[in-house]
Amino acid sequence: MTNIDPWSSTEIQDNEHMFSEFGLEKIPDAVRKKLDHHLFRRGIVIAHRDFGKVLQRIETKKPFINITGIASSGKLHLGHKVDIDLFVFFKSLGAKNYFAVSDIDAYVSRPKIQNMNDATEIAQENIAHLLALGLEKKDLYVQSQKEPRYYEFAFEISKKITENTYRAIYGHTDLGKVSAVLLQIADILHPQLEEFEGTMPSITGIGLEQDPHAKITRDVCKRLPYKLETPSFIYFKHQSGLQEGKKMSSSDPDTAIFLDDSPEEIKRKVNKAFSGGKDTLEEHRKQGGNPDIDKTYEILKFHHPDDDLVKHTYQEYKKGKMLTGELKTLCREFLTETLAKHQEKVKKTMKIAEQMMK
Amino acid sequence: MTNIDPWSSTEIQDNEHMFSEFGLEKIPDAVRKKLDHHLFRRGIVIAHRDFGKVLQRIETKKPFINITGIASSGKLHLGHKVDIDLFVFFKSLGAKNYFAVSDIDAYVSRPKIQNMNDATEIAQENIAHLLALGLEKKDLYVQSQKEPRYYEFAFEISKKITENTYRAIYGHTDLGKVSAVLLQIADILHPQLEEFEGTMPSITGIGLEQDPHAKITRDVCKRLPYKLETPSFIYFKHQSGLQEGKKMSSSDPDTAIFLDDSPEEIKRKVNKAFSGGKDTLEEHRKQGGNPDIDKTYEILKFHHPDDDLVKHTYQEYKKGKMLTGELKTLCREFLTETLAKHQEKVKKTMKIAEQMMK
């Protein structure tokens, strides 16, 4: 059996058409190794638009903008954590940080949120988790608390998107969702206004399927009456849901590990998670498991900080030396310990979050 | 010749279909006389929706909200003054006043305004004129300077209008114009939020053709997750342009008398204005003029404070006792004096306006 490289870019092959068709570029291997984070090293960040100019800023220690956001309809889960980890990584590289806690966006685009009070309550809880994951208070903002200049800018953007362009991209002009798009574009571009950081390259991490947002943002940027750098994007793979063929979703709790899940919930969910193991012990020992479809392994790949351990797990499981039960125990112990520590921090950061939302 | 009543409601007959078809109500004669302002007495305010509950507030000296706005693409003219005079009248009746200087609305909905700087410059000049016409600084606000709560509310509203409803009313979903509508609805409803005045009746004066705005606002109001009084509207006739068949418009300067027009401009425009006079002196003396189509008379009807003078002018002109030249002189002298006084005030209020926009 040849050496197995779990970071070999099968995903990139799968998504090859996106690159040629939509003009995304691959993250070169050299860059993946240069950026010292497992999301890059393990190929979870797989593509980019215009990342070169941000990389140059990082290498020459010049300022750049780090902007992302979460419009959450409830509790944060491991899928959100990928986005947050990426943001914290760019923060560690010296960025100007803008993390949007998108309460208005969440309210207007999600039918299940009944009123803005509910949206701000969700925002408050989200903030506590963001702070526990490594953000500082000054790195984030709540949409509903922003300066007038930000809102004015969101409305200005509406003038620069034709109805036809919008419909071609989104297939509708639902007013609530239009509002959410305007706010998202304002989130990404406003840090470059002179009232904030001024013109400079910016980086935003998004899922591959969100590329239409990126394209419309880059397009609008060129048509606004301001001198702005076209924003750069990196694209990450979404961590999939715990069941086969499902997305990790707040609306379907058993698909996701939430950042505030208890050890019992972790145990139950990991045990139930879709496995790449064989039906019998003999088969597994003989033919090996399939880590590429195993949701438990995916958790380790997306979140465990130790490359060697993750690589070793991949190989041992694939060879059939590691059993499904052993893999699940490893993952469960990792999650239990990691989330317990995280939840300890949240107890403290919740107070800061409450103050911010007063 | 029977006695001629210039306030007899020919306009109401003309617009009869609007009342039956769209559910507008006539302003009862008793109310027109009770409200001591020429815009009511002369039937320029011709219709309403739900005005009764505001009237009751006025009569029992209880608070009510007075909310209107101007999204101007340039200088203010006599047409705008009608709306402003009505606002100042309700202010004199003890209202809580909210006059929106709608710079964002103007920018997003008007192609000719190139950027927000131009929109705020226009706003500043408009404010100087508003203050000279009787508003105080505390009675008005500039959209681009509003509190976050206002913007949040504008976005909230987007969730409560379906795409189909919007398209049925406006025939498009142009994003800039959608933004303008959201802001207009927020302008009218936000004073009732608990962060502002709290729930109470409100009055807004609009042109008849703007009734779709009123209807969508009243409809949205009922579907928002707040306890709000459905807003009341009164409808005024628009002063027409100085040429036949034209609207008074900032984009077509010869159709309008601007509040900063010089005596020479006033003279030139009044002299050129469409007349209801006969072709020859003899014919005019014999058959009489037609004040109902005379743009010079219309200026007096909309703006001259003296009922007797306006009524007398109407009658004398109609009988052929007053000549077109005499009518034009009367109007020119009235405008020259009125606007000269106004422009003196603007010299002072311009400083306040500049400070407000800093």
Image (cartoon, coloured by chain):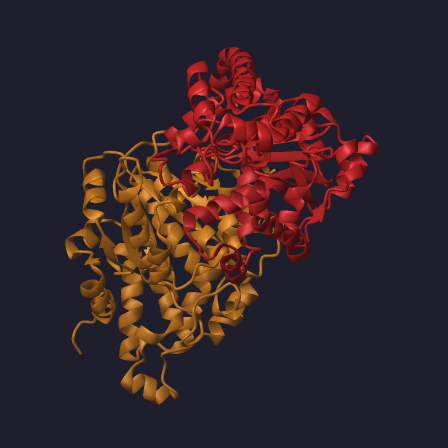
Chain colours: A orange, B red
Q: Which quadrant of the figure has residue B231?
A: top right
Observer-nearest of A270 and B74: B74
- Compared with B314, B163 (above or below) is below
- Compared with A173, B114 (above or below) is above
Q: Can residue A153 be seen in this view?
A: no
Q: Could you tell me how many numbered marks the image carries? A: 0
- Compared with B193, B311 (above or below) is above
Residue A73 lies, in percent from the top left, at 53, 57
Observer-nearest of A118 and B311: B311
Q: Can residue A43 be seen in this view?
A: yes
- Compared with A315, B301 (above or below) is above
Residue B207 lies, in percent from the top left, at 58, 41
Image quadrant holding the C terminus of chain A, namely top right
Residue A255 lies, in percent from the top left, at 48, 69
Is B338 situated left or right of A217 in this image? right
Image quadrant holding the N terminus of chain A, namely bottom left
Residue B190 lies, in percent from the top left, at 62, 40
Instruction: Write the residue at 46% across / 66% down.
Output: A332
